[in-house]
């Protein structure tokens, strides 16, 4: 069960926003397997920043200033090998010479690209690490740092209303929605599993041809089509209830229905069927509380939002552990620390990349080669990162530089309730 979102919100002094930059216009090239990399213009002058040319998600062409040897992100020679990156602290540069208000400013141009700055560029995809999915989502990190729940940022377009005018109606409708949404066919990786199989088959075929051309015998693994692992990309459903109290105030309750159930002391996960998951959800305090409120005749609004649970890449899981333990205070206060702390306690936006795990020596070796198994499982992992970081200045030095404090958190449950309570758009008048 996720923690109840704290309604108090303290504004930050500034917010650092991250964006995704692509080597090609993502509106015209949806194939992230493209080998094209970001264009780099090196200045040759240590006092003049190098520039990286690429496109934002809406097709805007941008030129980013990157200083080699900066405090964050990758250096220019590494960025030149990447095709998709996350730009932290993204800011468009405006021409201020003419004066006037903010709306009167025009962006500085670098050729046909808008000039902007960033505090660091971080890899989302390269030829060596070809991400299968790159995107933005509301995320919640599991406390042990091993998994992330990803939910769509378009809550209004995805939230489902669950009828709750009476107790029996609520029980029936909730069971129907959960059975439907938790069906394994809604696995996040169902559609990209074929892409993974083709990549593996292509890699093995290429290695065999290379061995044949060199007059040697191929000694690597044989191709075996894989299926999605039952532990990866399973659907989950966030269920939220707005309940009217006796004194007329609103309370918000929430819980998550999932195919996964923790067993034992070592984080072992058991995968349940949708029917078992519904039975398990009916044992939650949330379910009992909503039924009790309905029995008392209180006003109840219930909404559901479907997401997916993905295992975190090991390096990120290790960082989560370091932040949770708080041994190195720098790792808590900087880098991924503020994002991790916020995502473990609520919902925050994340820019993420999902990759299929291949053995670093593939096709010579593989993780799951077992001749005794007729079917092998593909494994997918996510590398989540920040999208918005709130910063605050030292009260004793209000003119000083703002430091990162926490990721911007969102009241996703409230967004869900507002979405299902919004009146349906009226039909256009007939001419």
Image (tube, rainbow, N blue to C red):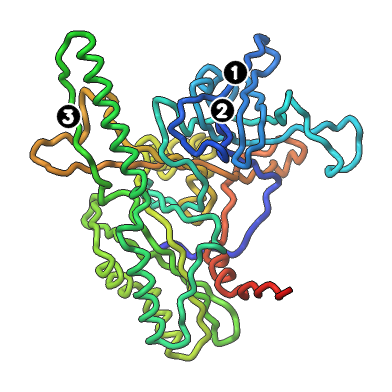
> Image height check: is 136 above or below 124?
below
Q: Residue furthest front?
A: 431
Which is closer to the viewer, label 3 or label 2? Answer: 3
Picture residue at 43% right of the left edge, 50% below the top: 141
The image quadrant that residue 209 belongs to is top left
Work out how far the residue at label 3 is from the one at label 1, CA to CA, in angstroms: 43 Å
Work out how far the residue at label 3 is from the one at label 2, CA to CA, in angstroms: 41 Å
Q: Which residue is mark 2?
A: 72
Picture residue at 27% right of the left edge, 29% below the top: 359
For marks 3 and 1 on the same chain, the one whose residue lies earlier in the sequence: 1
Give the x, y percent position of residue 47: 70, 13
For marks 3 and 2 on the same chain, the one whose residue lies earlier in the sequence: 2
Q: Neighbour class for label 1 at 10 Å: few (<14), some, many (≥20)?
A: some
Under circle 3, the secondary element is loop
> Image height check: is 243 above or below 341?
below
Which is closer to the viewer, label 3 or label 1? Answer: 3
Give the x, y percent position of residue 32: 46, 35
Q: Which residue is mark 1?
A: 68
Q: Which residue is mark 3?
A: 222
Under circle 1, the secondary element is loop
Front one among 195 and 292: 195
The image quadrant that residue 367 belongs to is top left
| Left/right of residue 401 with respect to residue 195 in the rendered view | right
């Amino acid at each position: 069960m996720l923690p109840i979102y704290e309604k108090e919100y303290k504004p930050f002094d500034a917010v650092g926003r991250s964006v995704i930059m692509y080597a090609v216009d993502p509106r015209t090239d949806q194939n992230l397997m493209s080998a094209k990399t970001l264009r780099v213009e090196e200045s040759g002058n240590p006092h003049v920043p190098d520039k990286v040319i690429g496109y934002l998600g809406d097709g805007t062409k941008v030129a980013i200033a990157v200083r080699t040897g900066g405090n964050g992100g990758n250096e220019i020679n590494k960025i030149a090998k990447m095709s998709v990156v996350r730009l932290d602290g993204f800011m468009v540069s405006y021409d201020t010479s003419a004066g006037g208000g903010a709306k009167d400013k025009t962006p500085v141009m670098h050729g046909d690209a808008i000039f902007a700055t960033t505090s660091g560029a971080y890899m989302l995809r390269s030829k060596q690490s070809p991400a299968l999915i790159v995107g933005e989502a509301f995320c919640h990190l599991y406390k042990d740092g091993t998994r992330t729940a990803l939910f769509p940022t378009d809550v209004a377009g995805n939230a489902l209303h669950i009828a709750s005018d009476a107790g029996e109606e609520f029980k029936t409708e909730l069971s129907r929605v959960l059975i439907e949404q938790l069906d394994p066919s809604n696995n996040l990786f169902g559609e990209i599993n074929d892409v993974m199989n083709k990549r593996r088959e292509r890699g093995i075929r290429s290695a065999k041809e290379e061995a044949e051309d060199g007059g040697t015998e191929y000694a690597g693994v044989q191709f075996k089509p894989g299926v999605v692992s039952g532990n990866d990309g399973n659907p989950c459903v966030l269920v939220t209830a707005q309940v009217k109290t006796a004194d007329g105030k609103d309370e918000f309750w929430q819980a998550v229905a999932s195919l996964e159930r923790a067993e034992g002391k070592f984080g072992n996960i058991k995968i349940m069927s949708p029917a078992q998951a519904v039975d398990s959800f009916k044992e939650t305090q949330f379910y009992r509380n909503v039924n009790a409120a309905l029995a008392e005749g209180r006003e109840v609004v219930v909404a559901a939002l479907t997401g997916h649970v993905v295992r975190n890449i090991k390096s990120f899981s290790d960082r989560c552990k370091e932040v949770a333990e708080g041994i190195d205070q720098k790792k808590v206060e900087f880098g991924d620390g503020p994002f991790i702390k916020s995502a473990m306690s609520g919902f925050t936006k994340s820019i993420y990349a999902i990759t299929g795990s291949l053995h670093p020596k593939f096709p010579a070796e593989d993780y799951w080669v077992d001749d005794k198994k007729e079917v092998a499982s593909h494994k997918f992992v996510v590398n989540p990162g920040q999208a918005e970081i709130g910063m605050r200045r030292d009260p004793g030095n209000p003119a000083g530089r703002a430091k990162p404090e926490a990721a911007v958190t969102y009241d996703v449950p409230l967004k869900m309730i507002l979405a299902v309570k919004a009146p349906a758009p009226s039909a256009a008048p007939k001419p």
